[in-house]
Image: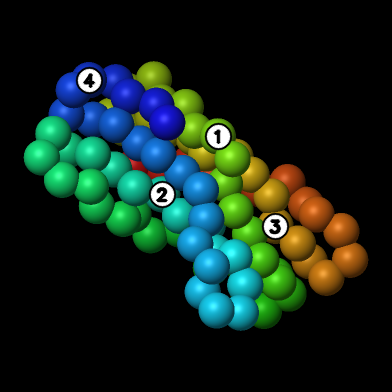
Amino acid sequence: MAATSASDAWAVGFDYTGTADQSMIVHWDGSAWTQTATPDLGAATIGNGLNAVGASSAGNVWAVGSYYNGTVDQTLAIHCC
């Protein structure tokens, strides 16, 4: 989890969709959590998740994790928001 203020916090992880893990980013705006869209990594991705998030400002948020391509885990880095 990372926060730049009491009304700007971010948390990351993954959600199991029934067939695979899907990365998840949620944002706290001071009153409610809202899920933020994550990139579609395509059919070659079997599952993906995020392990850490950092934010230096409300518009500069980075999340990192990995995705599985069917053979090995690959690095996943997302700049959002």
Looking at the image, which residue is at 29% across and 31% down? 9
Q: Earlier in the sequence, mark 2 or mark 3?
A: 2
Q: Earlier in the sequence, mark 1 or mark 4?
A: 4
Q: Amino acid at mark 3?
A: Tyr
Label 4 sits on a secondary structure element that is strand
From where the camera sits, is residue 29 visible? yes
Mark 4 vs mark 2, CA separation in Å: 17 Å
Asked whether, in this view, residue 48 is left or right of residue 63, the answer is right
Above/below status of 59 relative to 49? above
Q: Amino acid at mark 4?
A: Ser
Above/below status of 57 relative to 45? above
Mark 2 vs mark 3, CA separation in Å: 15 Å
Q: Are marks 3 and 4 in contact (CB under 8 Å)?
A: no
Q: Amino acid at mark 2?
A: Ile
Residue 5 marker: 4
Asked whether, in this view, residue 21 is left or right of residue 27, the answer is right
Task: List x then y, in percent, for residue 20.
Answer: 62, 72
In this view of the protein, which residue sits in the foreground, 71 or 16? 16
Task: List x then y, in percent, for residue 44.
Answer: 73, 74
Residue to which mark 1 is pinned: 52
